[in-house]
Image (tube, rainbow, N blue to C red):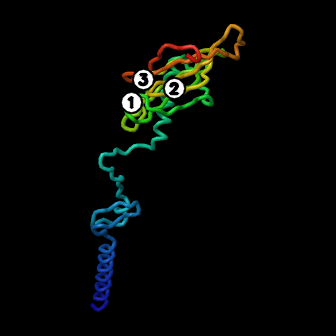
Amino acid sequence: MKKIGVVLLLVSAVTTLASCKKEESLTQAGDINLAGCEVPAGLTATQAEGVDCMPEKEAGKPVTQGAATTDDQVIKEAIARQAFVYGQSEEDVEVRRSFSADLNGDGIEDLIVVYMLNATDGGNSYATHMVAFTREGGVLKPTNSMIVAGYQEAVDELMVLDGVVNMVKLEQGPDDAACCPSVKVTVRYLVHSGKLMALSPTAWGQ
């Protein structure tokens, strides 16, 4: 009888310790897990660590990716579409040039990208293209893309004044070698109603 009493006492003690241990491991109101998330009261340590949370959005500001990454992705997609239209052409990435300026008069800097697509059909033809991007809600939105210089032509200079893109391109003269166009022509472009449009070209200096 005495032995049974000792056994019962030991069982009671173990049960009491287990109960205390369980109560101690439960979370309390206001506890924060290792992920930095507030967890509800009454959870075990394992349950508490499984609670996930997302950073709260700032009022009026959606959570977006970094601007630089987003811009680069939008530019690549726009060029890829144009390359597909022109028979799976390949871009010569090293000659791509970008220019920031307000193109639509909203006081926000937009973007002009000039790039070259090379033929992939075994020939050596190429063309220089230009696409304008307007920035809406912090994100670039592409307009149409245009060919601005063809085979044996080149873009020499580009600047944006009062929303108008002024491009100086080199065209073939009567005595020019195929590699070396020398006749300067200024062509002006603008973004109107979300579309990139060319104005009449003028001879250099006019």
**Count of numbered circles in the view:** 3
Left or right of 32 in this view: 125? right
Q: Quadrant of the N terminus?
A: bottom left
What residue did someone put label 2 on? 80
Q: Which residue is mark 1?
A: 105
Residue at the extreme top of the image, as rendered: 174
Task: Name the spot of residue 175 as percent of width and height, x first.
Answer: 71, 9
Q: Is residue 104 above or below residue 138?
A: above
Amino acid type, label 2 = Ala
Identify residue type, mark 3.
Answer: Val
Is the C terminus in the top left, top right, bottom left or bottom right quadrant? top right
- The image quadrant that residue 50 belongs to is bottom left
User: Which amino acid type is shown beneath numbered disc 1?
Assistant: Gly
Q: Residue 4 in the image: state x and y as whole percent.
A: 29, 87
Badge 2 or badge 3: first in the primary sequence: 2
Is residue 165 visible in the rendered image? The answer is: yes
View extreme (bottom): residue: 2
Earlier sequence position, callout 3 versus callout 1: 1
Distance from label 1 to label 2 (Cα)?
Answer: 28 Å
Q: Which residue is identified by label 3?
A: 191
Residue at image location 36% in from the left, 22% down from the top = 193
Q: Nearer the viewer, residue 65 or 134?
A: 134
Mark 2 crowd level (few <14, some 14–19, many ≥20, 10 Å Cα): some
Q: CA distance from mark 3 to mark 1?
A: 10 Å
* Cα separation between marks 2 and 3: 21 Å
Quick one: label 1, few (<14), some, or many (20+) residues within 10 Å? few
Task: Say which label, 1 or 2, has the lower sequence index.
Answer: 2
Q: Does residue 151 appear left or right of residue 61 in this picture?
A: right
